[in-house]
Every structure is written in structure tokens, then in C-alpha cells.
Amino acid sequence: MINDEERNNYETFRDCLSGPVIQKSATKSKQKGRRSSKGRKNAIKPVASASSQDAGEEQDADDLAEFTDYLATEIFTSLPSDLRTLSYAALQKDPDLSTKYTDPIPPSNLEALLGNIPASVPDTLLSYALLPDLSYLPNLLTPILTDYITTTTSAPPAYSTTRTTACEICERDWIPLTYHHLIPKEVHAKALKRGWHDEWTLNSVAWLCRACHSFVHRIASNEELAREWWSVEKLRGREDVVAWAKWVGRVRWKAR
């Protein structure tokens, strides 16, 4: 079972794993198709109906998703806890993690990681012909682990590159947007001194329409915003914000 703290990282790992698994599965399927096509050139082959073919493809996709989820869970839960919760923030607090999980991963660390993977993983990969033999396991998993580490430790983007096409509260996409400092600039010094936030998080923003931007500053002081309501998710979780978004989302200007 994946706990809430590790959920986002698990989904990132599963995504990194899915690419190679899907690619190898597709290659295997094509090879099987070529083998089955051998025989008399003029042999009459049964033609499946479009609906049955679509149903079969949908079932194949569901099976592949379930298979990938199984592999991701088996591997991810075998990783050390500091790797399961790895993030840019974690690297800022513990610089030793940068050495431990660098690119390329040090051989001794990689060997330890692979050594903890349960036997069910290589056995499954072998049984589905996704590995020619056990010696290829590092070749498959090393790029996946490296991709996962790179993704989870990437620095957050500059606020100017995070601009959305719709207000992040009312979701109106036809109205001008402004950026709201999730940690108001007036309390940056206090936020650092009190340990509420790390310095690299101070310029996080949300893209809001003017009406929602003003509403956010009406419902909480700058200090309250910095201490309690410092993310879009937290703001959208408030009942008053939900009610406001529902109401203002219906407000549209008439064409003149």
C-alpha cells in the first residue's frame, strides 16, 4: 500500500517505468504478429468485427496498465524511504542525498538498490519475455531509476513559466489573469525566520483572475496566507472558496 506522503513520487516512478514496459510489450507484440502471418499467401484469414477488435484492444490496454502498476508497486516499495520521498526540497535540507542519488548513480548504491528488489520482479519480467536473462535487469532498471531521480529532484520552474490558461480558483478561461504570491512578499522575512517555508519556495505563485485574487486577500491576512493557505490546493479546500468559485464562475460579461 502506498501512503499519501509517497503517492506523488509513486506515480512519477510508475510513469518512468511505463515507457520501457510499453515499448518492450509493443515490440514483442509486433514480433508475434509477424510470426503468425507466415503461411500460405492466399490463406483465408478470419476477419474480426470492429467492435470485437476494439474491445480486445481495450482489454489489452487495461491488462498492460494493471501489469505496470503491479511492477511499479513491487519495485517502489522495495526502495529506501529517502528515495521514495526524494524531492528538490529534500535535497535542500540534506545535501548528502545529492551525492547518494546523483546521475549516474554510484555503482555501490545502484547495487544496493537492485539487491533489494524482490525476486518476483525479475521472475515476472522473464516469464513475460521482457528480459532475455537476469543479467539484463540492471540495463532495464538503471535508466528508469535515473529518470525517476531526475524528475523528482528538478528545481521548481520560475513563476513566469507556470502561467495557466484559466483562473486556478474559478476556472474561467476567458478573463485576464494576475499572479498571486502564495507566500505574500510582505512576510517573506518572517516566514524564513519562523521556519514556515524554505527560501526556494518563497516565489511560488497562483494564477488568478482579479476577482478571485481580491477575494483571497479578503478572507485571510498575509500572515495567515503564509502559514496556512500557501497552496492552490489548500485554498480550494476551504468551504468559502468553494462557494465563491461556484458563484463567480457563473459571472460573464455581456458582449457590447
Image: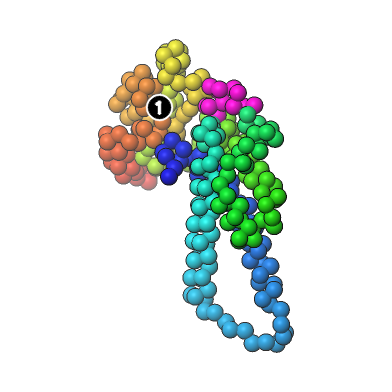
| Res. 169 in view | yes
The answer to whether residue 192 is above or below residue 203 is: above
Residue at image point 54% right, 35% down: 80
Between 35 and 46, the residue placed more toward the observer is 35
Say whether residue 152 is magenta: no
Q: Quadrant of residue 109?
A: top right
Q: Disc 1 marks which residue? A: 230
User: What is the x, y in percent for residue 178?
Assistant: 45, 31
Say whether residue 93 is magenta: yes
Between 51 and 142, the residue placed more toward the observer is 142
Q: Quadrant of residue 218?
A: top left
Left or right of residue 105: residue 76: left
**Taken as a whole, is the magenta stretch helix, strand or loop?**
helix
Q: Of helix, strand and loop, which one carries label 1?
A: loop
Q: Give, as a three-letter code, the residue at label 1.
A: Trp
Q: How is the image coloured?
A: rainbow
Residue at image point 67% right, 87% down: 43
Look at the image and tell me in which quarter the N terminus lies: top left
User: What is the x, y in percent for residue 56?
Assistant: 51, 70
Left or right of residue 236: residue 159: right
Left or right of residue 250: residue 179: right
Left or right of residue 115: residue 90: left
Residue at image point 71% right, 79% down: 38
Between 229 and 152, the residue placed more toward the observer is 152
The answer to whether residue 80 is above or below residue 95 is: below
Span of residues in magenta? 88-99
Look at the image and tell me in which quarter the C terminus lies: top left
User: What is the x, y in percent for residue 112?
Assistant: 62, 37
Residue at image point 67% right, 76% down: 36
User: What is the x, y in percent for residue 220?
Assistant: 31, 23
| Res. 186 in view | no
